[in-house]
Amino acid sequence: MVTAVAYRLATQHAERQRVLDTLRLSREQLLEVKRRLTEEMARGLSKQTHDQTSVKMLPTYVRSTPDGTVEQGDFLALDLGGSSFRVLLVRLKNEKKQKVDMHQKIYSIDQDTLQGTGEELFNYIVYCIADFLDYRGMSGASLPLGFTFSFPCDQTKLEEGILLKWTKGFKASGCEGKDVVKLLKEAVQRKQDFDTDIMAVISDTVGTMMTCGFDDRHCEIGLIVGTGTNACYMEQMRNLQLMDGDEGQMCVNTEWGAFGDDGALEDLRTDIDREIDAGSLNPGKQLFEKMISGLYMGELVRLILVKMARKQLLFQGQTTPQLLTSGCFSTNYIYAIESDKDEEGLASAEKALRSLGLDPSAEDCAATRRICQIVSTRAAHLCASTLAAVMRQIRDNKAAEKLRITIGVDGSVYKGHPEFSRKLNKMVRRLVPDCDVRFLQSQHGSGKGAAMVTAVAYRLATQHAERQRVLDTLRLSREQLLEVKRRLTEEMARGLSKQTHDQTSVKMLPTYVRSTPDGTVEQGDFLALDLGGSSFRVLLVRLKNEKKQKVDMHQKIYSIDQDTLQGTGEELFNHIVYCIADFLDYRGMSGASLPLGFTFSFPCDQTKLNEGILLKWTKGFKASGCEGKDVVKLLKEAVQRKQKFDLSFVAVVNDTVGTMMTCAYQDPKCELGLIVAGTGTNACYMEEMHNIETVEGNEGRMCVNVEWGAFGENGELDDFCTEFDYAVDEASNYPGKQRRYEKMISGMYLGEIVRHVLMDFTTKGLLFRGKLSERLKTRGIFETKFLSQIESDRLAMRQVRSILQHLGLTGSTCDDSVLVKEVCSVVGRRAAQLCGAGLAALVDKIRQNRNLNQMSITVGVDGTLYKTHPHFSRIMQETLQDLAPQCEVTFLKSEDGSGKGAALITAVACRLKSEQSL
Ligand code: BG6
Ligand code: BG6
Ligand code: GLC
Ligand code: GLC
């Protein structure tokens, strides 16, 4: 008899074990789960597979964990989606370090509201906020709000969240596919009790990570095991293929609750799991969550109890109506039953079973306790596997041998279950042995984290608005650009007119170049000098007549030191002559006597080609005793002093003219020369003689050197200028000169404008963490090449940052780099647009001179800024096209500098001279 009973019990026990065995997972199986989630995560991050995957890996627009910046202010937080709905007031104070005061009130949401219409749900939420404000004596207050909304949301920014689907116990209609921020705003408007700025919508995982990250800077994972389960972590932007940009990090909400929804876990799911899914609010969805989280754990146990009772393995085969009612076995029972004190646990089991109308034996109670243990262990172990996958991803991202990481965690199961956290911790350590992991339980829910995110967003939004306000002063409207064109047209007319020429800023200097190359083939050896650009060159240009014109060029670049540039004129010209002598030596032509084309890139009054009275130095030149003198004479005097060689003829050519001629040699339609350089900007064009009142004669054309760099010197552009333009002018070599147009366009000044804007932002605490470095105070650090590099689309932000570091601006963050790039872009765009507006004035003038309705023309162009800047030419051309639609303009980059053009001009002049003397 005893044997028979013992046998029956043993068989029942074995049979129960068999049922429970299906819920036990081996280490291999857990590693396999980890592997599969790793795969799913990769699919979720990838652009191609994102749509098909069940693990959505949603970008959260939270870009960093708390970084020690102290925030301040009062914030509201809503916490919806966990076991309780809360409204919170979070006070962030700056008292030595960050201090946080929190006040909260929990509100219940009844089943009808959870599963009614969306409007009802959001009305209720707003009602609760109003009640909370009342209760805190703050009725009608308008505070920024952070919304912890614990459901999967598609975000394109922090303050927007399109609900993808309800999960857990929520099912309010008309919300899926909608922006929950908008739904909340609409409800606030309906109620009209208070106003609020909804700054952020975040997942509870993110709120938890941020709450914990506040206390532990290694916290880069947020984990929830509560009503539902989910995790978020800090991912590298470069892995977020759905997002633009590859610099820095962003928190990703994995939404791992949906893991398995595509069948990935079928071999591990049991009949019980299928049954629970079938009876849920969302069959087929959140399959992983249903094996783990609090909403389902009690139900899993109940279904096992029913199954065993039906198999005569428990309760002597008895069931009760309560046992058969879904939801009757609360997850809280499990917490009590699994108490680490056996007796207490068994007593709790008996109590729970009796509350279901059962009359359990000691064996039934022990078996129930065992079932609870198996179910919760499976949950903890599955959770460990998925956590291991996330940790591995972070470790791989950091390429760290041993990862040190903290996991911020919250949720009723983790907190309430006596064994869950220990089992989870233990299995995580077994699955990822090479990680130094710490679990940090959130003591403040996700509200604190939500408030932190909101505070940062609020501060950033305020700062963004302030920065945009400043940058807006550097943005020009189409009307303003048209006005620039109009005013330049007016100044050009005044420059050409005899009466007004002296008062105008735009000098319209005659160049005595009467035509562009007309196909006549020239011959001979010519020297050329190129002074005034970024490098000083001496050239030998050989013009040959071989069927058509052939040009051979040899050049040598010489440096001119600062002392010479700003010393006496005699020193400067001695140096130039020394360089020519050296060059002739180097070419084996010592003692030669050649004609020379002198590209002299400064404004000169000319009455003939071989004379140029320097009106004023511009750019970085300042040699004394030159202004008002003929530079040909200064050069020849220096040649005589040296007595090493002779110059038979010297033509003075502005760089714009040289460039136009160089390009016209290639394209006869080139009748305009443009320089957009590191130091200056200017243009020349072929004007009708009868319009040039300052020169005798009405026939034909002459090239006019506009000298537009000085446009604005009489205040013509003051209303478009910013405080930065004034500051740059005042600190320049020639305050008040070349003021406005050149100082708004050429590279050196753009760098200075950028630097002044950055200094302003830094002083206002909007950049470089408010630290104004000595380096940033240094004039000239932003050379043209850096502007061009920073704006290059091919550069990742990381590289921009390294440029800043190279410039000595160390300690800049990724956001700083983004901002510096934006400043460069705004300043660069304005320059390109202004230049486009100027060109529009020029081409329309030429078109009108010729009485043409439509005209096509080529512009020969040179200069470091134009050639190296990634966007300048495009923006300039777009503006030009917009402002001068009747002209079809082609741009031809000069590849040979202006030396070739200067030599051609000299050759023609020498030929004409010798023809005349015949
Ligand atoms: C809380 C968070 O602490 O944990 C909630 O503030 C979150 O946002 C919750 O949803 C998860 O736990 P549970 O058990 O309430 O679902
Ligand atoms: C060169 C011309 O190609 O371009 C120079 O030969 C001119 O005369 C120069 O001044 C302008 O560009 P940058 O940027 O080199 O001064
Ligand atoms: C569900 C939700 C998810 C949330 C989790 C924990 O899985 O879909 O967004 O984070 O529950 O509350
Ligand atoms: C300055 C000079 C001008 C020159 C330009 C480009 O504006 O005054 O003559 O063409 O720089 O180098």
Image (spheres, grey):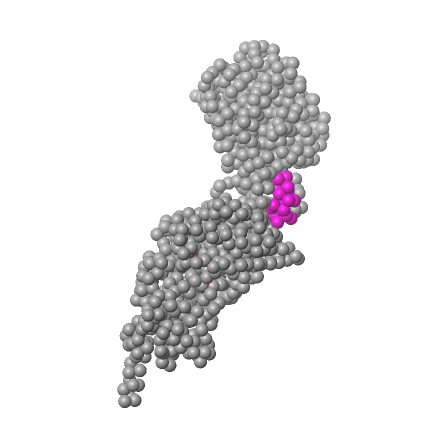
Label total for image:
0
Q: Residue 703's x, y, as percent? A: 56, 19
Report if residue 757 lies within the magenta region. yes
Residue visible at 28% across and 88% down? 3
Horizontal side of 40 relative to 884 (left or right) equals: left
Vertical position of residue 884 compared to residue 49: above or below: above
Report if residue 617 lies within the magenta region. no
Horizontal side of 315 relative to 611 (left or right) equals: left
Residue visible at 42% across and 50% down? 118
- Location of the N terminus (image quadrant): bottom left
Occupied quadrant, residue 585: top right
Between 428 and 859, the one nearer to me in the picture: 428
Vertical position of residue 476 compared to residue 231: above or below: above
Magenta residues (range): 756-771
Between 716 and 72, the one nearer to me in the picture: 72
Residue visible at 38% across and 69% down? 329
Q: Residue 740's x, y, as percent? A: 62, 29
Q: Can residue 481 be seen in this view?
A: yes
Horizontal side of 319 relative to 704 (left or right) equals: left
Q: Is residue 406 visible?
A: no
Between 346 and 486, the one nearer to me in the picture: 346
Vertical position of residue 50 compared to residue 661: above or below: below
